[in-house]
């Protein structure tokens, strides 16, 4: 499902206006210091595109695509805002307990960066590539420290408003179908989620690539007797008088 640029801009501006009005009314509630900024930058991570995941976890975008059971490249090139792109399709991308299909337009001339990503619910049959989950589009790249980096884009998550039985099938027959077959034959009506299209912007002067970071910035002096949980190492330890006493 693709919406015109004018429609996306209108929805984005309407969302900005609503959030700004709400923020002005509640900016001092719950200890807030300043109003919420709708187009403020979401912190990028190596495993996300403009702060959004295709699949949760610590895998990179390339690792996610390589892990799909079926990956193919269209023979015909795609074109987005000028550059020719390779269009890659991956079927069966696992995200926790759900499975998606992903279609991505890759700019081969600028560090193989994606310019558009479409994620669909993985459904067999006629509904393959029809039931949209998320679209990341209008991705703008900027060269930072010699690397092409995504700095702007629009993200739209979709929800299914209605699912109907196909013509010629009775309600009794429709209810008797298995869950997989039900998804395969249904007629879907979709619309953008409650937030509508969301613009994500990265300010280039806040990004440094491959510059190195002083290890001291990651050192935290915890108080004695403090119990620390390390999510990355999946471990815990207690800060003691003679150093850290790990469990």
Image (cartoon, rainbow, N blue to C red):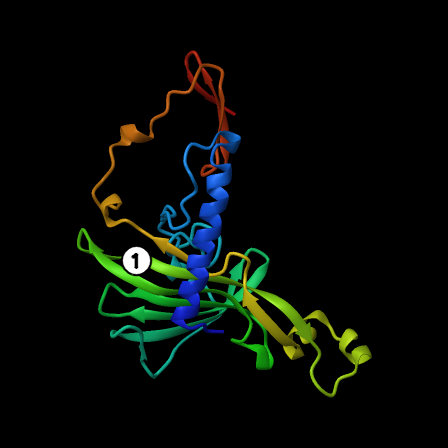
Query: Residue drawn at (43%, 11%), measured in percent from left and top?
Result: 241
Secondary element type, mark 1: strand
Q: Is residue 142 left or right of residue 33?
A: left
The image shows residue 221 at horizontal and vertical percentages of: 37, 20
Residues 142 and 106: in front is 142
The image shows residue 226 at horizontal and vertical percentages of: 49, 19
Task: Work out whether residue 199 can be spotted.
Answer: yes
Is 82 above or below relative to 97? below
Is 236 above or below relative to 203? above
Is 243 above or below relative to 7? above
Q: Is residue 31 left or right of residue 151?
A: right
Q: Is residue 75 left or right of residue 28?
A: left
Q: Which residue is mark 1?
A: 150
Is 199 above or below relative to 112? above
The image shows residue 231 at horizontal and vertical percentages of: 48, 37
The image shows residue 143 at horizontal and vertical percentages of: 20, 57
From this viewpoint, which residue is outermost toward the top?
Answer: 241
Q: In which quarter of the view is residue 152 placed? A: bottom left
Query: Residue drawn at (47%, 42%), measured in percent from left and top?
Result: 23
Q: In which quarter of the view is residue 131 placed? A: bottom right
């Amino acid at each position: 499902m693709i919406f015109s640029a004018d429609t996306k801009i209108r929805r984005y501006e309407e969302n900005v206006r609503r959030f700004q009005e709400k923020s002005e009314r509640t900016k001092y509630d719950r200890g807030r210091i300043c109003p919420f900024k709708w187009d403020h930058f979401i912190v990028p991570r190596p495993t996300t595109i403009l702060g959004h995941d295709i699949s949760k976890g610590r895998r990179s975008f390339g690792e996610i695509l390589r892990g799909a059971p079926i990956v193919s490249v269209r023979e015909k090139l795609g074109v987005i805002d000028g550059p020719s792109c390779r269009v890659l399709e991956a079927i069966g991308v696992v995200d926790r307990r759900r499975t998606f299909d992903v279609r991505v337009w890759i700019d081969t001339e600028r560090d193989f960066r994606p310019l558009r990503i479409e994620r669909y619910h993985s459904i067999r049959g006629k509904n393959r590539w029809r039931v949209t989950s998320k679209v990341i589009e209008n991705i703008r790249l900027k060269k930072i420290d010699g690397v092409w980096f995504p700095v702007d884009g629009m993200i739209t998550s979709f929800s299914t408003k209605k699912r109907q039985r196909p013509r010629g099938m009775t309600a009794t027959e429709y209810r008797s179908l298995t869950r997989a077959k039900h998804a395969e034959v249904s007629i879907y009506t979709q619309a953008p989620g409650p937030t509508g299209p969301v613009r994500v912007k990265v300010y280039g002067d806040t990004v440094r690539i491959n510059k190195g970071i002083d290890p001291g910035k990651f050192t935290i002096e915890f108080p004695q007797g403090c119990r620390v949980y390390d999510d990355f190492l999946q471990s815990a330890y207690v800060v003691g008088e003679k150093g850290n006493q790990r469990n």
